Structures are given as structure tokens and as C-alpha cells.
Amino acid sequence: MNLKNTTVFILIIVLVGVVAYGAINGMDLGKIKIQTARDQVGLGLDLAGGVYVLLEAQTDETGAELDKKMEQAMAIIRQRVDGLGVSEPNLVKEGNKRIGIELAGLNDTQQAIDMIGKTAQLQFIDAEGNVVVTGKNVKKSEVSFQRGSTGAEEPVVSLEFDKEGADSFAEATSRLAEKTADQDKIIFIVLDDQIISSPVVRATIRDGRAVIEGGFDIQSASELATLIRAGALPVELKEVRTSIIGPTLGLESLDRSIQAGAIGLALIFLFMLIVYRIPGLIADISLTIYVLIVLGIMIILGVKLTLPGIAGLILSIGMAVDANVVIFERIKEELKTGKTLRASVDSGFKRALSSVLDANITTLIAGFVLFYFGAGPIKGFGVTLIIGIASSMITAIFITKFLLKTFIGTNLVKNTKLYGA
């Protein structure tokens, strides 16, 4: 028995078990309390209900011009409340001048109004009160990464302006960069008369591409990028009615879906153990890690879980198993030719890699297409699909291989029949 590999393998099992227990039951560590994954994952309208808001356009315009502005307003509102496409709000045009909005997981109508906003005006204003550029000049606003003073990659907000905005911004930054005091070099980013950021100009920006930096984490950078990107509504919208709406399906459907998922997962685990024995055990551990990774990403991104989303999550588990099956079949073929366990594992993973990558990359492409061209639930499904496939590739190609080679390195089991041969 190799003590080092055995210790590493046992520690991994214990760590996965503790994290899985915390995800299912939660944990109380004195001052630190960890909620269950179910409590942390947001639920969609069909499972948790939310808030309904009806807005009416304050304009005398009619015909095609009104239709154009209403479509623009709906697109901007959707961007504000669902910049990443995971909150799945329902937006419906009611008549010619009204927009009905349903937001999941909220029980405060004022919170919904604050989130949607009304006639937001985005402006970049210098310390003297001069408007440098407005929201209409912003072509792009997104999160990127650059190396900070510590040498680590830090999230920042990257901006790109149109030709008019680039010229105005170059003139303003050239003037502000010459000032000595930082408070005189600030450009305030103002939305709805509220300052959402106040970056300091360090140098003249002539190409229309600016970077806002300064202690962001991923979430705060994403929120600022989304607010800037949303811009201003093309028409004033007045609140007509707000109300609380109940879940269309209820938590009973969630409980049944979770039970179905647990049963399906248990059957998959049993199947892998019976057919592939030791590799099947390793696959079961990897699948547990896969589920934890997916749930963690969903919690971090704030994905709203709907009943179709649960079905997609259960389906993605089956897709994750497929990669392991392809790999293990290749390993079995290598063992039958008389190769050693280590050589069979290396060769099996190498032979299966192209098949696994081809299958997953084509699905990833579909996910990116849905995310880029879709809206609402379609865009949200694209995000969850990308999360599932990316996590599946990581667990199948890297984690499963590491765990299997570590177990073989323990020298606890050398009989090739227990490896499926």
C-alpha cells in the first residue's frame, strides 16, 4: 500500500463528503452558518412566485415609432433585471403602450420598481458638472481582467464609446489628466441621478476604450457593467399597477423533482458500480463533484431555477456520465491487450479525449448560440447548458483521471477484473 496516495484519496473522499453534506443539510460552524444548496439557489416564477408590475408609456406617439420605442424599452428593462440571462423574467407587451413584467423571487413591489427603473438617464459628468458623454455614446460595457498592482488578475469594467463619444471623452480626459488633485480628476457615472461609480482619470484616452478599475469583485464589476450597458429608456414609463403573484406550480413540484433527481442519480451510481466496478466508483465520486460544481456556479451567478431547469440539470448529469462511459470502455480495451493498469488508463484517456471533446464542443457551440441570440428563458437555458457542459468536461477529463490514477497508486486493488476488464 502506498501511504501517500492512500492519504490523498481518503482526504478527497472526506472533503467531497463534507461539502455534499453541507449542500444537502447545511452547516452551523459557530459564527459561520452555511445554508443548504436548496435555500441558496433562487427559484423561478413557477416555483416561488414573485411580483407583477404594469408600466405605461407617457407619450403621444403612435404607429411604428411607438412600437419601436416600446420594443427598445422592453429590451432595456430585460437587460437591467436579467443582464446575464439567468433570472428569467416574463415581459409581455399589453396593448400599444403598456408592458407587463413578472419578476421571480421578489415579495416587495417597491424593490421591483427600483430594479426596473423608470426614465433612467446615464451620464458621465466631470467634477465641474459638465456632461462628458451619455448612455447613447456607450457601444460596449463588459467585465474583463487585467493585472493589478499585486500582480494578480483583477476584474475591471471595460468601456467602448462610439465616434462622437470617443472624441468627447478624449477631450475631457486630456483636460482632467493635467490636474493635480484626484478629486478634480473624477468622472462621475450617474444613472437616475445617482452616482454608480466615480473613477479617477489617470491619462488621456484617445481611442474610445476606457477601463474602470479599483477593488471590484466579479459580482460588483458585472453589476456596474450591466447598469452602464442598459443605458436610458427611450420613453418615460409610469407605474400603473403592482401586485404579488403566487407560484404557478408550487414547492410540491420542486420536492417531487428533487426526489426524482435523487432516484435517478442513485440508479446511475448503481449502474456505474455494477458495470465498471472500481472505475465506476471513481465516476460516482466525480459525478458528485460535478453536481457540487454546477450548484456552486448557479448560486454564484444567481440562476433562477425553474421546473424545466431542474429537468435540464438532471439531463446534464446523464450527459456527464456519457463521457465517463466512453473513457472507461477505452480503458477496458487497453487492459484486454495486456497493458498495465497505469498504461491502460493513460492510453484510454488519450484515445477517448477526441471523442469526448467533439461531443461536448458541439453542444457548447449550441449553448453559446442560445445565449447570444436568445432572450429570457432561452438565454437562461443557454447559460445553464454552458455551465453543465463545461463542468462535465472538467470532471471527466481531469478529475476522474486524477482520482483513478491516485487510487491505482494506492496499490490496494491490482486485479484487472475489478477495473472492468
Image (cartoon, rainbow, N blue to C red):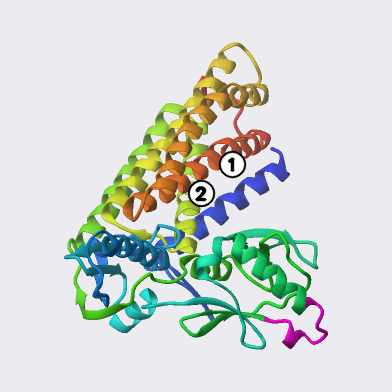
Closest to the observer, 338 or 349: 349
Q: Can you give x and y, in whole percent of width and height, for residue 13 in the image?
A: 56, 50
Q: Can you give x and y, in whole percent of width and height, for residue 362 in the image?
A: 47, 32
Residue contact between numbered discs 2 and 1, judged by CB atoms under 8 Å: yes
**Is residue 272 positioned above or below 311 on the image?**
above
Q: Is residue 40 left or right of residue 306?
A: right
What's drawn in magenta, residue-wise? 177-186
Q: Can you give x and y, in whole percent of width and height, for residue 250 in the image?
A: 20, 64
Dot 2 alpha-carbon crowd within 10 angstroms: few under 14, some 14 to 19, many 20 or more: many
Question: Image point 67% across, 77% down: which residue?
Answer: 199
Q: Is the magenta region chiefly helix, strand or loop? A: loop
Q: Is residue 418 visible?
A: no
**Is residue 100 positioned above or below 139 on the image?**
below
Question: Image point 62% across, 87% down: which residue?
Answer: 129
Amino acid bearing label 1:
Ile
Q: Which residue is mark 1?
A: 399
**Is residue 262 positioned above or below 199 on the image?**
above
Q: Is residue 183 magenta?
A: yes
Question: Image point 65% across, 26% down: which residue?
Answer: 346
What is the secondary structure assignment of the residue under circle 2? Answer: helix
| Marks 2 and 1, how far apart at CA | 9 Å
Q: Which residue is mark 2?
A: 289
What is the secondary structure assignment of the residue under circle 1? Answer: helix
Q: Can you give x and y, in whole percent of width and height, for residue 258 in the image?
A: 29, 54
Q: Is residue 401 left or right of residue 383?
A: right
Closest to the observer, 315 or 8: 315
Q: Is residue 89 visible?
A: yes
Of the image marks 2 and 1, the number of the one nearer the N terminus: 2
